[in-house]
Amino acid sequence: MSVDLPVLVSPLSMGVMSLLAFLVSAVVLTIPVFASRGRAQAIWAGIIGTLLLAEAAGLITLVVLVDRGVLFG
């Protein structure tokens, strides 16, 4: 099943969009880490780090699938 998009989605453009999305979410999600101190800060850092790791893995997978032509190909 082919999906026709009004713009060309290349692996490079998908990577740039993914990087921007990751950076924005990293800034927004780390606000509680910087707003707390002590043990709460360490807990927040662990939770946010895990979320950012999962997001990065998903975005990298998405870019690889676009590069191979599985998505938007």
Image (spheres, helix red, strand yellow):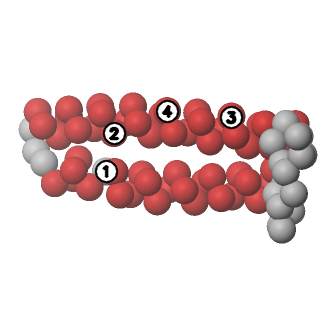
Amino acid type shown at disc 2 = Ile
Q: Residues within 10 Å of mark 1 (few under 14, many from 20)?
A: some
**Contact flag, marks 1 and 2 (Cβ < 8 Å):** yes
Residue shown at the point (20%, 34%) measured from the top left: 42
Q: Position of residue 21 (x, y in %)?
A: 54, 56
For the residue labelled by badge 3, is the local secondary structure a helix, a strand or a loop? Answer: helix
Q: Position of residue 51 (x, y in %)?
A: 40, 36
Where residue 61 is drawn, which disc sits there? 3
For the residue labelled by badge 2, is the local secondary structure a helix, a strand or a loop? Answer: helix
Q: Position of residue 12 (x, y in %)?
A: 79, 55
Where residue 54 is drawn, which disc sits there? 4
Q: Earlier in the sequence, mark 4 or mark 3?
A: 4
Label 1 or label 4, whichever lies nearer to me, is: 4
As drawn, the residue found furthest toward the front would be 1
Is residue 53 shown left or right of residue 42?
A: right
Amino acid type shown at disc 3 = Thr
Q: Is residue 28 above or below residue 37?
A: below
Rounded to the nearest angstrom, the CA distance separating label 3 from label 1 is 23 Å
Q: Earlier in the sequence, mark 2 or mark 3?
A: 2
Q: Which residue is mark 2?
A: 48
Q: Which residue is mark 1?
A: 30
Q: Earlier in the sequence, mark 3 or mark 1?
A: 1
